Amino acid sequence: MLKERLQVLITAEQRLRLEEEARRAGVSVGALVREAIDARVGAPNLADRRRAFAAVTAMRGRYLSPEELEALGDDERDRTAPAVEPG
C-alpha cells in the first residue's frame, strides 16, 4: 500500500525521458520511479517478506474487515458528533 508522498525536482529532459520510458514499458511514471528506487537502494528481500508473512499469519484473534472498521468509525462519529439544530 502506498502511503508516502515525495516531491522531487527534475529537469525537463529527465521528465521527458521518464515519460517516454514509462510509456514504452506500459507503466506509470510513479511505478517507474519506484522500480528505480528499489533497483538503486534495494527492495525488501524474500527472507524479510517471508518473516513478515509468518508474523502476520501467527497472529491470533478476530480481525475486522475494512467494511466493519468503516462502520465502526461511522457509528462513533454519529455517536460523538454534536447535535445540529435545523434551520
Image: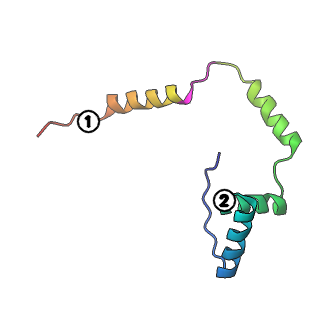
Residue 43: x, y in percent?
A: 81, 52
What residue is rendered at 84% in x and 56% in y? 42
Instruction: Classify residue 12 as left or right of residue 80.
Output: right
Mark 1 packing: few (<14 Cα in 10 Å), some, or many (20+)?
few
Residue 35: x, y in percent?
A: 77, 58
Secondary structure predominantly adopted by residues drawn in magenta: loop
Q: Which mark is residue 28?
A: 2
User: For the residue marked with disc 1, what is the amino acid?
Assistant: Pro
Q: Which element is circle 2 on? A: loop
Question: Where 55 falls versus 11 (above or below)?
Answer: above
Name the image quarter holding residue 47.
top right
Marks 2 and 1, how far apart in space? 44 Å
Instruction: Classify residue 62 as left or right of residue 54.
Output: left
Residue for badge 1: 82
What residue is rendered at 71% in x and 70% in y? 20
Kindly check if marks 2 and 1 are in contact, taking CB atoms under 8 A apart as contact: no
- Residue at the left extreme of this rendering: 87
Which comes sooner in the sequence, label 2 or label 1? 2
Q: Which mark is residue 41?
A: none
User: For the residue marked with disc 2, what is the amino acid?
Assistant: Ser
Q: Nearer the viewer, residue 7 or 26?
A: 26
Q: Nearer the viewer, residue 44 or 33?
A: 33
Residue 69: x, y in percent?
A: 51, 29
Name the image quarter holding residue 24.
bottom right
Q: Nearer the viewer, residue 67 or 72?
A: 67
Instruction: Classify residue 13 as left or right of residue 41.
Output: left
Q: Which residues are magenta?
A: 62-66
Q: Nearer the viewer, mark 2 or mark 1?
A: 2
